[in-house]
Amino acid sequence: MPFRLVHGKAILESGVTIAMGVAAVFLIVRMWKEPSGATAASKPVPHDLEDISGRALSTTIRNAATAGSDLAPVALIEFSDFECPFCARHATGTYEQIQSEFVSSGRVQYVFRNYPMERIHRSALAAARASACALQQNRFMEMRSQLFANQRSLASIDMNKIAADIGLDVSGFTSCLTDYGSKAVEAEKREASRLGVSSTPTFFIGRRLADGTIRLITRVPGAMDYTYFKRGLDAALAEKSPSRSE
């Protein structure tokens, strides 16, 4: 009887050891096949253009940073975060294509709006305020380029030095940061929330109305390829809803 008890215990322990070994091998294989959480999260989720023309949404672009003609019939509005890697990728790639084909021709006005995601990007709010104050001195694009170029060091960057480097009145820039800059960014954040923005970058394509407001007709969810923007902008210029890609 003791032998049987000891023998049964040995079998049980062996079984547990084997089961643990199998589980470990399975876990290693799974980790090898699947990307880590950080890597998986860094890949954009494929989406398509969203027709929002039936929602009766409109927005004003008064006091926003813009590129292109104020008379352009179509506006492309970007809600962005200077610490967002996808925003930087769009700014240095896709934006240039949009600017070349649509903005420079006067057909589309590009609009930049701040939406700093402070919970995950600790330096985004300060960068957004800096861009708003640069806009006040007509140097937004220069500040935008510098902030995205130094994205990985925003926490330690000297904003006053950047301001001086791009030709801003540093004294006026400094006083603006806690006054106008702060209020401007908060207003843009409220507008982003009203329009349902929850991540960056988020884009809206709209038609300009007679009073200057923008009637939103398409939402572009994320830093998508240029072909998606081209399809949405072409559709807006032709006054029709973009069809889903085949």
Image (spheres, rainbow, N blue to C red):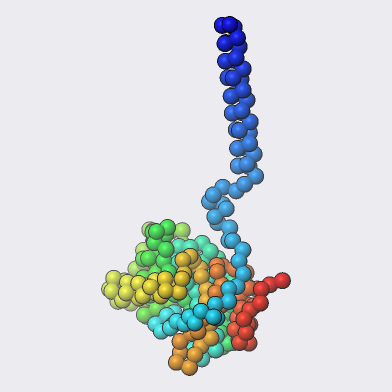
Q: Where is residue 33, by image quadrant?
A: top right
Q: Is residue 85 left or right of residue 241?
A: left
Q: Nearer the viewer, residue 49 or 233?
A: 49
Q: Is residue 42 above or below residue 15?
A: below
Instruction: Residue at 61%, 11% (x, y): give it.
Output: 7
Instruction: Residue at 54%, 77% (x, y): give it.
Output: 52
| Residue 3 place in picture, x, y as percent | 59, 6
> Is any part of residue 143 visible from this angle?
no
Q: Nearer the viewer, residue 63 or 147?
A: 63
| Residue 30 place in picture, x, y as percent | 63, 41
| Residue 226 place in picture, x, y as percent | 62, 72
Q: Is residue 71 left or right of residue 14?
A: left
In the picture, which quadrant includes the N terminus? top right
Instruction: Residue at 43%, 77% (x, y): give it.
Output: 140
| Residue 27 place in picture, x, y as percent | 60, 37
Q: Is residue 244 left or right of residue 131?
A: right
Q: Nearer the viewer, residue 139 or 53?
A: 53
